[in-house]
Amino acid sequence: MPDLHDLAVWHMPRPPYAYPLAQERIRVRLRLARDDRRLPSVQWSDRMGWRGFDERAAMRWYANDATYRYWEADLTPVEGRLRYLFRLDDPHAPAAPTWFGEQGAAPHPPRAEWPDGYFHWPYLHRERFVTTPAWLRDAIAYEIFPDRFAHGSPPVAPELIGQWPGADARAAFWGGDLVGVIDSLDYIAGLGANLLWLTPLFQSPSNHKYNTDDYDRIDPHFGDDAIFQRLIAESGQRGMRVILDGVFNHSGLNFAPWRDVLAHGVASPYWGWFDIDGAQADVRARNYRTFAQTAAMPRLMTANPDVQAYLIERAQRWTRMGAAGWRLDVADEVDPSFWRAFRREVRAIRPDAYLVGEIAYDAARWLEGDQFDGVMNYPLRRAALQLFAPAGQRPVGAPEVDDRLDGGGFLDALSRIRAWYPGWATAATLNPLSTHDTPRFLTAMGGDLARLRLAFTFLMTYEGIPMLYYGDEVGMAGGHDPDSRRPMLWEPDERQRALLADVRALARLRREHPALRGSGFRPIATADRSAAVYLRGVSGWEELPGEGGAPSEVALVALNTAATPTTLDLRLGADPATMPGALTWPAHARHARDLLSGAAHTLADQTLRLEVPAGGAVILAPEG
Amino acid sequence: MPDLHDLAVWHMPRPPYAYPLAQERIRVRLRLARDDRRLPSVQWSDRMGWRGFDERAAMRWYANDATYRYWEADLTPVEGRLRYLFRLDDPHAPAAPTWFGEQGAAPHPPRAEWPDGYFHWPYLHRERFVTTPAWLRDAIAYEIFPDRFAHGSPPVAPELIGQWPGADARAAFWGGDLVGVIDSLDYIAGLGANLLWLTPLFQSPSNHKYNTDDYDRIDPHFGDDAIFQRLIAESGQRGMRVILDGVFNHSGLNFAPWRDVLAHGVASPYWGWFDIDGAQADVRARNYRTFAQTAAMPRLMTANPDVQAYLIERAQRWTRMGAAGWRLDVADEVDPSFWRAFRREVRAIRPDAYLVGEIAYDAARWLEGDQFDGVMNYPLRRAALQLFAPAGQRPVGAPEVDDRLDGGGFLDALSRIRAWYPGWATAATLNPLSTHDTPRFLTAMGGDLARLRLAFTFLMTYEGIPMLYYGDEVGMAGGHDPDSRRPMLWEPDERQRALLADVRALARLRREHPALRGSGFRPIATADRSAAVYLRGVSGWEELPGEGGAPSEVALVALNTAATPTTLDLRLGADPATMPGALTWPAHARHARDLLSGAAHTLADQTLRLEVPAGGAVILAPEG
């Protein structure tokens, strides 16, 4: 048997273990066992010159979770071509490195003429440079379910008002519209949000409109082309962008091609757009593939070039009309060839369009650079539920086992998600506490506003795009759908004004401190299991372009989930010999200020004794 | 720290760890540490029904190398959708299974409503069912370098005859042509080969023609359209197929679009077909990207849709004219979008076209079902060199270290390659001992014909397509290019007739015994490090359709690389409790015959004492 640590070593020459950056450079990652103390480096060369492996790159610490430790390095291919090999140096046996290539671990490098011993990025095509929009680094998102958000003045569909909830809250309309959204733009901008995600707007018989009947038309309950364009213009004037919800996995039952298929069976020119058994579609028998088991949502054959051309043309039209990007529904069930074409064609219209997929688990397959910029980060929401859920109060749908996380487990979970994705995807991830498909976070917290505020503090100080689900910021409650889709609380007396002020203040901190939105992240160990402490900062290896800030920008975040105050002894330095490249509190910065309370703190040798209030947080930035 | 064995567990929901089969089924693999004795199974369900995980599939042993053990199971998605989780049962702690999902190992399964704990194949599109041609299972390939193979009678280019080798064997022409190939078809068919790979035929100024000047025209030194069509017709009459060499990574300097770019600079409509610095291409300064550092081979921008359309149209034309597939040159440096379109468009012309990429290392990235059927198996050639190279005689280009393999190391190397790829790709791999880009295998063996014969015995009894490089079968020698491209030995007195007879006999055995070309493979342990012993057979889980044979078809292959005879004590059974599904010698088959010598053998309890001659082999099949 080889060294047991060697069993844990993993690399593959593809994302997220190898991926191109914005320029001619490849970032490579290596996974080692968490307690493997060997220091990795990369030796590399051109693939064709058959020259020696004279280039050697040190690796830097990137992340560690409970099981593994992840390392990174950036390599520059020679005329596009790269061959490389990892080298693990044991400080206790410096003359006996281990080499790790495609054939596994070995005490010496393979021969240069046998390529299968090495890893290869055979050619880096210019078309594969990463093109994630720079503006995402500064984005804060706000999700609106238009039927429940705001009535315009005057309302677009006055006939709907008063119907909700009626006998069936799941099916009823409340009558919100796009004029109402326009009327609310100052409120949303005041929250600090600058990215609006509207759930589907196109014509559909339902209140949620995830069964599209006409991809060419804004639903008349919501508005029309002119109102949509006014929304784009008025939000643009406030520095806000609008992304649309693209439902391309399935259609509604009044979608013209589906109606044609119902009328003409296999003779319909649209027969190949759907996946139907036999020669005639039958809605009652549901003899066709659907979204979930929903007869009203016939699945589209998204590998079919005609279907692709039809839907992508519509997406281009709305992009031309001002959509800044697309949130893509049931993205994981659509054929990847659809998304590759979608990205190419939408980006041709708007090179900085944001494309984010609805995928609720490890989405690395869709984050290779040719499909999405990011995904909805449901695993992050899960980790937040597991950390912030009050003791004795299980999240909605509690199982037999107590699967809550302590502070260390929470940081491990975040690190594991970071290791799933390229850095540019982590930066472009949409991070929600609640969505229209989940219970409200406040309800999952048993109604405890302090816990919701603490979760917002995490969200606003973490990498990726913080996403507010309409009303969470004023303390809206709600269980599973339809309860999570109650009308927006506009009545001043019903709104949690202190919470709203806190959310605004946190968004402002994020805006003012590049450290809180950079890609630097390092968990800090504490003895208190109720605390989650991490450094945030602008890293020297940011993957999204943009202002960013100086590489020394750093902040310390300490969250205390306990009902009592805690005192933490924190060591914020990182030994460059064992943790090279890790984010660290600057050695010269001996004074710090809590951005929340304004209190001053003093450090000695990058260490700090810090008191964190019960259920509260400290966000420390260097001063002077 | 978790259990050290847990550190080695690996799965990812993509090839080769998960991949669709020919029908609505997903094959999943799991990697465990080699000495991990836990038995894995898979629990799975629909993704949408939120039903319990009531479906459970046992896993079967698939392979093991020096470090890991690989398991497999086949799962049937529910209306296309699949969610699954691995379960590891320790026979010594039956009540405490370990669960393995996207978040790693845990003592209990994650909650059903948190998808990120599970693995997902979110939707299996019909277009993604695997369509590898069934005929590959019975293929034996023969590679021809046309300029060096045979002069036609009459020759197509008599003016070239007598020029080779001249002052520069690398550049000179010998004058072989397609008429010569046609005249040799009976000879090639007599070898048992039924798949001809011809290195490039299209017009080019070089003898190798890897710098294409005109993709529309057979090089006039080789023939013309009519001669090509005669080759297709006459080989077809002998049950043979012809695949062409597609060089789409780069062109030659007389390629019309390149000439246009040279003439008109950035003003040329073909400017975007190449990757040129500045505003004017300059061959002397080589201010453009090329294949390797070869100015005469300007790299094509294969992500450019115009380039794709142009080249794929030509490939379609030659496919219509009878090409049974394509060997694709420098396949790893061409943009993957090119290969996806290439497969789609060529398969539209010929649904059973064989597409094989030239990739010299782990090619899993290209073997996900949407690019190639298989690749050239250079890693297998390397393993064969490492096993069969005579003691004290290093392969050409010997390094400082002795990296020869013993029998066990060779079987480990084969197993590692098997674990790299989906089974359908392993079955469709082109397995060479020599190619036009390598020294001849005989030369690497120091001229030892017995070692070459033993390597042929391996090749003809292993999975994948055995490939003969013209002349290897008659004992041609040759070092690196151009020495490996000497003219074919046709002179009877210069040919190794015994070797030729052996190759024919081995090909006949392969044809007559489905076990030798099935997908079943299991290394058999021996005490003798000079021996490599394995079971071969038709597995119950073949991935290529076709006749196949009965699932109980089995053969034992024993290779002895030593200069002395050896006696091996072999145990051919496999305990179904610890190695479920592994290929095994049938318990009832107590009589066996050596297919090479005709000798009879008797087994007791699936065990056998077997004498293998010095540098020789035994191929044992059950009898009676």
Image (cartoon, coloured by chain):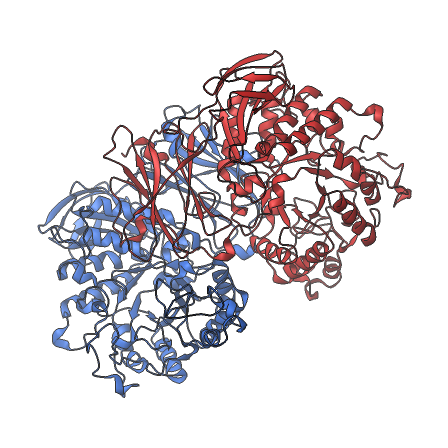
Chain colours: A red, B blue
Single out the residue that lies furthest toward the left: B564
- Answer left or right for B578 relative to B82: left
Placement of B597 over or under A139, stated as above or below? below
* Quadrant location of the N terminus of chain A in the rendered image: top left
The vertical placement of B533 against B374, above or below, is above
User: In the rendered view, would you say A390 is above or below A195?
Assistant: above
Q: How many marks?
A: 0
Name the image quarter holding residue A548: top right
Q: Quadrant of residue A138?
A: top right
Q: Position of residue A536 (x, y in %)?
A: 54, 30
Q: Residue extending furthest top? A: A564
Residue A39, image x and y in percent? 34, 33
| Residue A81: % across, % down | 39, 55
* Image position of B595 with respect to B261: above or below: above
Outermost front residue: A624
Residue toward you, B291 or B401: B291
The picture quadrant where one finds residue B300 is: bottom left
Instruction: Report the residue at 19% width, 50% height from top.
Output: B399
Q: Going by the image, does A561 lie left or right of A109?
A: right
**Residue A409 in sight:** yes
Residue B585 in sight from this viewpoint: no
A497 and B51: which is toward the camera: A497
Q: Residue at x 29, y 46 (%)?
A: B522
The quadrant of the rendering that contains the C terminus of chain A is top right
Give the x, y percent position of residue B569: 17, 42
